[in-house]
Every structure is written in structure tokens, then in C-alpha cells.
Amino acid sequence: MAMKAPVIAGKYTLLRRLGHGGMAEVFLAKQMSEGGFEKLVVLKRILPHLASGPEFVTMFLDEARVAADLRHPNVVTIADVGRAGDTLFMVMEFLHGQDIRKLQRKVAAFGQMIPFAHACQMAVDAAAGLHYAHTKHDLNGKPLSIVHRDVSPQNIIVTFEGSTKIVDFGIAKAAGQSTHTSTGVLKGKYTYMSPEQAQGEVVDARTDQFALGIVLWELLTMRRLFKRDTEGQTLEAIIDGAIPRPKRFRDDCPPAIEDVVMTALQKDKNKRFRDCEAMAFALEDALAKEAIVHSQSRLAQYMRRLFADQLAEEAALGVVQPDGSLSVKNTFPINNPRRDEPKVEKKPEPPKVEERAPDPPKPSLVEAPEPTQADRKRTRSRSSEGRVESEPQRPPPPPPPTPEPTRDRGGDRAPDRDPPRDRGSDRDRPRDQGRDRAPADRDRGTDRGGLRLVLGAVAAIAVVLAVVVGIVVLTTGPGPATLVVRSEPRGASVAVDGRDSGEKTPALIKGIQSGEPHKIHLELPGHVPLDEIVTVPKAGTTHEVSFTLSPVPR
């Protein structure tokens, strides 16, 4: 059921839809040029129903103009801007990695904290990229006066090569813009606004510094700083300016790093760092003072361990080449591995960390970070006996599927202990019993009693192990599961691994094998066919996925 991939402007083949937001949708694409030149890029296209609106077109072009001449290792590069039919598109470099929000969620799922070295490395690189944008001049030497205004975890990408890049200048403020935001109009994510931005005042580069300070605070504590139940409460918390020090939620946070974070988060922007470059220098000095070793290479290793499951799946599907780079040949459509080929058994492992977290986070990011009475009274955990080692240390792994047998609630002994003495032994019997029995007979009776006890204990342990293993296999091992596929718009035909399911979205597909990647193919007349890889994590469960189909370009 594979279909020919759409081609934009004669040289960009759309491989996969990565998502959409605001006024545009984003695709992974392959750029093709003369001489067999090919490379992966990201194509951002204005949504068709907005392409006729002059305001959205102007905003889209403003973003392209702002980022067009930005060339820095920590800023996404814009390669091209063009028009396909009635729709504008922008082409930028492809970043093989994850944004900081997804990174945080992955770390939280392992019950860990992000090592200080990696959190600060991300912040240092992001600050360098922001400073470059803030001080950039146009080709005539005129300052562009760029202010991003939407610095947030979703707009900071960390690649598997260890580089951190600022993306999405969609609402950036710049001197050469065609449209300008009126005073009092809020643009950006409320939870990452500065006090002056929340009050609708004039913003400058120090606004981005404050937002980066929020991101770093949340990287260190694995909590949300200003997130509240409503947008109004969130803005009130930002304007109030009461910010707890990271040490309240992470006892081993070095004071030097804390000081950098709290300076960037000053309510009065005149009390913050002079610029983002000064913030980056202060962070590097703090890391040196605390003897914390950091580098992009170490961050890359951490990312590869953290997202080992994703990389293993991509390798199994031929999307990733041996050197770790993506293949432009197998990205669309992705060929499902043959059933007779060996399955990839690599399991995701928690990343090695470089310091012990005193208070592991909950399985998800805390959405209500306001300090509670319990937070203030929580006892201090063991202080770290030393700083970060030069080589990362592996943390305790997740609980093994088959625990070692120990004394259970019924009083059974662990197998490494001596079995209990038989209560029917000669020592515990009345003196008049067994006197007529020959010594050899008495010895054999005692031996048989002890043997029965040992065999009984072994049998009990075997039963417990069998039950535990059975539960683990049923809940975590491979087996049939149910997949629910939804789409917007509804009514798309669904194929699984190249076979038509006969279902239309919302589709209920039973008997799908868990623990294996499956290619889901959606088709709907008038829309771009969609291919996605889905893995149902557990047998015997129902897993739901939702996709949005894009109209075919006119």
C-alpha cells in the first residue's frame, strides 16, 4: 500500500509528518539536487487554510527573515524559503535529537534527576545561541535587535551528537519585522514569560535570559516553576517574583550554580546578567568552581543512553546507519523487519548519572511546584560525599522482572539460609518415644524429615518464582494486544505492516504483537498518506494513537 511521497517545489520529498502547531505543519523531508546530492531537512509549511490570510503569511515571512542569516552552532539554520502552489514553506536543518521537555519526561520516567553537568551544558549552549541572535547585525551592519520571546523547553533541541540548539523564531521580535506587537499584547508561553513580558511591557534580550533561567531551574529540580491551575494564576506567580532556590527541592545543588540561576531570575531586569553571554560565562565558572566535568561529548553519550530504545528501533528499521546518521533511503516508507529476522532485544536502560540525587522525582514532572509545608519539612538526605566523577557512574537499574526470593509474609526463609529444624526431630519428642527404635532407624527418620522439609521449602520457592515470572511475562513480555488508531479527520483507512485491516478511523485492531515496531499506514482521499511507527509496550493492554492528516497541496 506504499504510495509515492509528495514532492514540494520539485526538490523536497516529504518523508514523514513530524507535527504541527500554531500556523504551520512540519515534515521530515529529503532534499534532492543534481549529481545525486541528497540530505535530510525539515520543511515547515504554513497550514493551507491560513495561507490566504495576509496576517499569517506576513508572520511566517517575518520568521524566515529573522532566522535567515543566523549561522551559529547553537541556532537552527534556515536553508530555503519558497512557495508551492498557494502555500509558503521554509526549509531548515534536520536535528536528530529531542527537545528538553521530552528529555525531562524521559528522565522522570526512570525516577532520576538530570546531572548538573548536563543541565548546565545545555544552558550554556542555549545562552550562547541566544546571545548570538541578540547581537546579530544584518548585511548592512544594522543591529537586528532580535528577541526570541518564546524560549521554552519545547524550543530547545538537544541532539544525539550533544549539541543544543535554539529553534522556532516564529514570534521573535526584531527591528526589521513587517508586523509589530502592540504594547500590552502577550506573545509566548505563559509559564516561561518574564515579569515585564507578563505585564505587557517592552521586552529586550534580558527577557530571553529570564526564560532560560526558568528552563535551567526546572532542569535542576525536575519541577515546574510557575505552572499553576489557570493562566491568570501563572501570570500572578511570575509578576509576584517569589522564586524558591533550587536547593529547596534538590539538597545537593551547588551554591555557585544556584547563584547563577537566581541572578537570571531577578524580577528587576537591571539586576540580571548583562547579557546571555555573561550568564554562560558565570555558569562555566560555577562548574569549574565545583569541579564538575562537562562537555558536549558527555552530553551526547547521556542522550544516547537515555533514548536507547528510540535509537534501537530506528536501527532495526534501517532508519539509522551504522555511524548513527539517518538514512535517506529507508525513512519513507519504512520497511517493517521480516518476521524471520532476529528481533532487536535491546531494552532501554536508564542513563548513567554523575551524582546521586537526594530526592528522586515522581514518574512525571510535577505540575504544581509551589512549595508546600511538606516540602519545607522534608528531611535532608545524605549529602554527596564528592563531586562529579570524571566518568559517569551507572545508577541503580529499574526493578528486575524476577526478584530474588526473600522471606515472604508467610515466613518462608530465603534459600541461602539453613532450613528450619524439623519439629518432629528426636530432640523435641518425649523421652519415651523412639527408645525401642534402633540407632540406624532413628538416624534415617531424622534424615527423611529434614529432606522432606528441604524439598518442601524448594517447592514453595519454585511456586513463588513461577507465579512472579508468569506475572512478569504476562505484563511485560511480548504477546497480543489491542491498538486503537484515531485520526483527524476521521474515516481514514488503516493498514498495519502493509496489510489492509479493513478498518477506518477510529479503528480497533486486535491481536497486534506487543514489544515490536509496527508500521501504521493511513489513507484518506484528499489528504497526504501518513506512515508512522507504533510500538505497543505491554501485552494484554489497549494502546491508543492519534494522528492528524494534512490536505494534499494544491
Image (cartoon, helix red, strand yellow):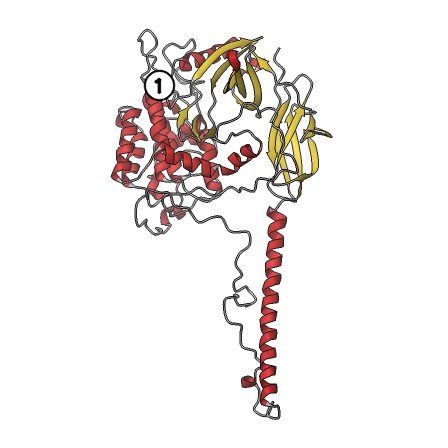
| Residue 461 image position (x, y, % from top left) | 58, 64
**Element at label 1:** helix
| Above or below 32: residue 472 | below
Observer-nearest of 403 and 527:
403
| Residue 238 image position (x, y, % from top left) | 38, 30
Q: Quadrant of the N terminus?
A: top right
Q: Residue at x 62, y 62 (%)?
A: 463
| Residue 75 image position (x, y, % from top left) | 39, 21
Tell me where residue 273 sits by quadrant. top left
Observer-nearest of 250 and 199:
250
Residue type marked 1: Ala
Q: Residues within 10 Å of mark 1 (few under 14, many from 20)?
A: many
Q: Residue at x 58, y 26 (%)?
A: 330
> Relative to 76, is 10 on the left or the right?
right
Residue topped by disc 1: 133
> Relative to 84, is 255 on the left or the right?
left
Q: Residue farthest to the top?
A: 140
Observer-nearest of 16 and 155:
16
| Above or below 544: residue 410 | below
Q: How many marks do you count on the picture?
A: 1
Q: Residue at x 62, y 17 (%)?
A: 551
| Residue 51 image position (x, y, % from top left) | 55, 11
Observer-nearest of 172 and 35:
35
Q: Residue farthest to the right?
A: 502
Q: Quadrant of the C terminus?
A: top right
Tell me where residue 428 sits by quadrant. bottom right
Q: Residue farthest to the front?
A: 35
> Relative to 182, is 451 on the left or the right?
right
Residue 367 visible (yes or no): no
Residue 552 visible (yes or no): yes
